[in-house]
Image (tube, helix red, strand yellow):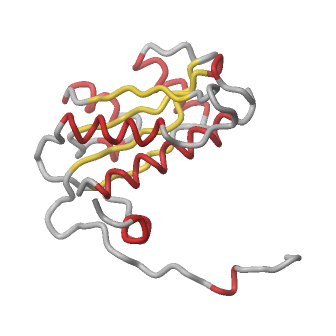
Amino acid sequence: MADFETIINTRRSIRQYQDKEVEDEKILKILKAGMQAPGSRLGAEPWEFVVIKDKDTLAKLAEIKPRVKTAPVAILLVANIERAFYKLHWQQDMSAAAENMLLEAVNLGLGGLWNGVAPTEETMDKVAELFGLDNENQKPFCIITLGYPADGLKNKFMDKFDEERIHYEKY
């Protein structure tokens, strides 16, 4: 396991992947990392996950979110609104789960990409229909694509620190 500072500083959006299957054990670790995220209230975490490995399903999903096309696996993050504590703030809980998952992917030697679905209603409706979700209580949030980075791509450090963006006491 790499140290956290290395993981958080080297995570990058990886958009192309090798034609290599991601091991089920790694997928499970990524799902567990998502479930370890902080939520609005203990026991009221809204996240649920759909793991997608079937090439036909990935192709259909790529018609909605094109960057899914090259991924060997995608994970759809779904908010179960009935389990959310703050019914209007579920996207914050889901964001924490998604970032945990992306960081764990780096830890496991994988690349990942956050493909936004919410809050665009048209995209949410299309994804909900494809996966048989009740878009009233089961809100598609994002799709995380995962895989081994294509040749020449890797998670690497890029210094994004900008002291001018830091303000103390007032903006």
The residue at 42%/28% (across/down) is: 49
Q: Looking at the image, which residue sits at the far bottom? A: 163
Q: Please say if 95 is above or below 32.
A: below
The residue at 21%/26% (across/down) is: 54
Q: Front-most of 166 and 145?
A: 166
Pinpoint residue 117: horizontal percent, then vertical percent: 52, 38
Q: Please say if 45 is above or below 165.
A: above
> Does residue 56 appear to the left or right of 5 in the view shown?
left
Pinpoint residue 70: horizontal percent, then vertical percent: 23, 46
The residue at 47%/33% (across/down) is: 77
The residue at 23%/48% (across/down) is: 147
- In this rendering, the count of numbered labels is 0
Q: In which quarter of the image is the N terminus?
A: bottom left
Q: Front-most of 80 and 139?
A: 80
Pinpoint residue 106: horizontal percent, then vertical percent: 32, 58
User: Residue 170 is drawn in which quadrant?
Assistant: bottom right
Q: In which quarter of the image is the C terminus?
A: bottom right
> Does residue 119 appear to the left or right of 149 in the view shown?
right
Q: Looking at the image, which residue sits at the far left? A: 20
Q: Front-most of 41 and 133?
A: 41
User: Residue 121 is drawn in which quadrant?
Assistant: top right
Pinpoint residue 99: horizontal percent, then vertical percent: 48, 50
Q: Please say if 129 is above or below 98.
A: above
> Does residue 147 appear to the left or right of 89 in the view shown?
left
